[in-house]
Image (cartoon, helix red, strand yellow):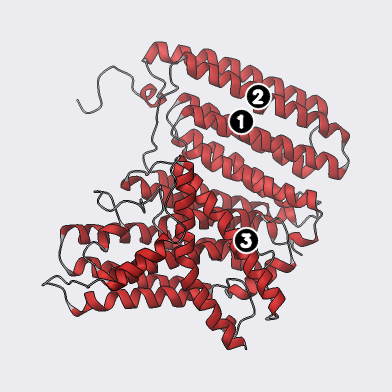
Amino acid sequence: MTPAHLPLLQQVLLVLAAMTLLTSFVLLQQARLVAAIHAFAWQGVLVAAMTLIVAVSENHPHLYFSAVLTFSMKALLIPWMLHRLVRRLELDRHIEQLARPSLVIMAAVALVIFSYWLVLPIVQHGLEFTRNIVAVSLAVVLIGLLMMVVRRQAVAQVLGFMSMENGLFLAAVSATSGMPLIVELGIAFDVLVAMVLFGVFFFQIRESIDSLDVDNLNRLTESREDT
Amino acid sequence: MTILLVVLQMLLYVLLAPLLVGWIRKVKAVLQNRRGASLLQPYRDLYKLFGKEARMAHTASPLFRAAPYIVFTATWLAAAAVPLFVTQLATAGIADIIAIAGLLALARFFLALAGMDVGTAFGGMGASREMLVSALAEPAMLLAIFALVMTVHSTNLATLVDYQLTASVLRPSYLFALSALVLVAIAETGRIPVDNPSTHLELTMIHEAMILEYSGRHLALMEWAAQLKLLLYGALLVNVFFPWGIARQGDPGALASGLFFVMLKLAALGVLLAVSETVLAKMRLFRAPAFLNLALLLGLLGMLSTVVLEVGL
């Protein structure tokens, strides 16, 4: 079967899933922090829209609430907090180039293929139309992880962490039609608290090493490695 | 009858190519608050160049003289394979999208050779830049094409357009392929973020640097070939992704409406191109690989989303 057999709403869902994957790649490679935060906000919008579509087409009323919660948290509140942090840390013009951008992108592509291979057995267990999105959500999680590995900037790493959470949420929505409301609320508050803590940590890190490049934390002394 | 249609389409390509360029220039002029030259100015330029004497450098080899004809013919052949306003032509069987990429590569090869032939500094620089851009653009184009043909199971353009007409489905892979092909088309036709088409003496020029030594009818052929290439990519984009209105058989009413719709779509595409060229600045040459890497990534994502999201539903 092909997408031609799906109703329009579910075709839109597939397109949104593909665009979510694209925002992950954008996040991974975006050198400017403010633009990366915007990409993260768009990812939140896409995830919220997908939740809404699943809620409408599968008739799960509690997913409406999840969609609203995701939209307000991931697309508005957290990006706004990050934006404010970046402005207060005076990082809005900061540019962090990846050491080997194309290699990182290829690694991310490999992760997408890997996650597709990983979910193949799950897909055979007859989920509904959302099953193909499980692979995308796993890829979003893994790319978030990759982002935390390759980016050195603390704010960018937090973005990677948050996009991992997006992926997990997407997996929950697509594989099991969302988590129980109480779990979802708990996770939302966890993420929010994590965000606040990260904010505090940013200032602490900057005060102690005068930069948010966390690679500097690997060194024990002030002396350089080559001396 | 069908052969007649093929000839008609080939002639239309050649005749409409300068018009598209004139239209884009006109829209750009209006956007920049200028009156702009008439829509027919590119025709007048070509006519003027054909009337002028063709001068050759002393160091030029026979290849330099032959290159304009080869470049023009190869581009024209490639264009003839792209359905412009009707899909079921007599040549539909050979309208293979990979053959088109090959013909364009042939044209580009001779263009670069001609650039280096005379031995001027600009020609060599232009040729090396063209090869830098095209070496990156070609894989991106092929990946985008693969993303398209994976759903159709055919690299034939007529089949592809027919399939698009019958099954209008929202496919993520098509969105990715469309954006990748747009980026590739911009790079390959030397439009603004990659190359500036309106410059004639700029250190970072690519296409103009290669044809700097040409004059007279040779220059006319080279410029005409470049205009054809722009029309080819425009027709490819609008007919593969927005095929509505294209004629499928050769009855005159359908042909006329097909021609009308394709001109309408090309005009809209020209406006989009003019707007994007007005709001964007040309980027540094060394940013071009990043630009084309993005196209490559989009093509790759298109293929992946075909496999991950669209197969096995």
Quarter that holds the N terminus of chain A: bottom right
Disc 1 target residue: A41
Q: Is A31 displayed left or right of A53 in the figure?
A: left
- Among the two numbered marks 2 and 1 on one chain, the one whose residue lies closer to the N terminus: 1
Instruction: Pick whichever, A224 or B113, lies toward us.
Output: B113
Residue type (three-letter) at the residue carrying disc 3:
Phe
Q: Position of residue B178 (x, y in %)?
A: 57, 56
Mark 1 belongs to chain? A
Circles 2 and 3: CB atoms closer than 8 Å: no
Give the farthest residue toward the left.
B58
Q: Which amino acid does the dot numbered 1 rest on? A: Ala
B61, above or below A5, in the image: below
The residue pinned by badge 3 equals B241
Please report the residue visible at 79 percent of the width from the left and 41 percent of the height from the top: A53
For marks 2 and 1, give the CA distance. Answer: 7 Å
**Pointer 2 indicates a residue of which chain?**
A
Chain bearing mark 3: B
Label 2–label 1 contact, CB within 8 A: yes
- Please name the residue shown 61% across and 60% down the image: B264
Question: Which amino acid lies under the numbered mark 2 shown in the image of this protein?
Answer: Leu
Q: Position of residue A109 (x, y in %)?
A: 52, 51
Q: Same chain for labels 3 and 1? Say yes or no.
A: no
Which of label 2 and label 3 is nearer to you? 3
Q: Which residue is mark 2?
A: A76
Badge 3 local density, few (<14 within 10 Å), some, or many (20+)? some
